[in-house]
Image: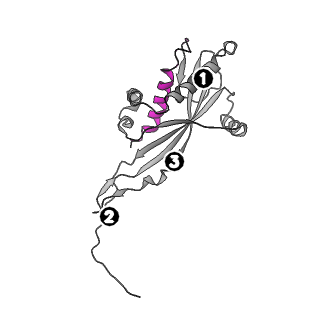
Amino acid sequence: MSNALAVATVTQALSLLIADNLAPEMDLAVNVETRKPPNEPPTDPTITVFLYQVTPNAAMRHTDLPTRGPDGTLRKRPAAALDLHYLISAYGEEATLVGQRLIGCVIRTLHEIPVLPKDVIELAAQAPYLAGSDLAASTQKVRFTPTVMDIDETSKLWGMLHQTPYALSVAYQASLVLIEGRERPVPAQPVRERTVRVL
């Protein structure tokens, strides 16, 4: 499990993973930015990594309850189980299909490396604003899977980005991110008296 910096650490690590795997197909300098798609499309080759939604993980949503041993002692803190939803967009010179080449590199990278590597997480956590992130020590791995979106869903998503022109994009879900609570819950009090009634 991880602390509250896990969400931002996954975003930073995803951008590093993409940036480090653009070669050999791309021989251009590419900006990989963790931001929403810009209102003014950049002219330089650019990839944006945008976390547009965070949702509870359906399979693990009950891990928010503390776990106790047979004697009532606390074994595990409550945790929030999350899925992170990313929109990854590409920009560049259309005459040479830069955006399409960049999207191809993103798809190839996340197909080859679907699980976020520990060394990339550690590198991401070196950012000053992520000091204290412990995601790299978590036993729970973060896996990326492509999200299938039809035309209607895509239109709604881009409509949410007010005055942002559409760009060639792919959507991915990152699962599973567990954020552990800071404080231990108050231990349950032992039973002092048992009363049995027969009706």
**Residue 77 pos. (x, y %):** 36, 51
Question: Mark 2 belongs to which amino acid?
Answer: Ala
> SS for tag 1?
helix
Report which residue position mark 3 lands on: 57
Q: Is residue 42 visible?
A: no
Q: Residues within 10 Å of mark 2 (few under 14, many from 20)?
A: few
Q: Residue at x 39, y 26 (%)?
A: 123
Magenta stretch in the rendered image? 1-28
Closer-to-camera residue (146/12): 146
Q: Please identify, in this view, whether the residue under mark 2 or under mark 3 is nearer the observer.
A: 3
Tell me the quarter of the picture where residue 140 sits: top left
Question: Mark 3 belongs to which amino acid?
Answer: Asn
Could you tell whether 142 is left or right of 87 in the image? Answer: left
Q: Please identify, in this view, whether the residue under mark 3 or under mark 1 is nearer the observer.
A: 1
Q: Earlier in the sequence, mark 2 or mark 3?
A: 3
Report which residue position mark 2 lands on: 188
> SS for tag 3?
loop
Could you tell whether 101 is left or right of 193 in the image? Answer: right
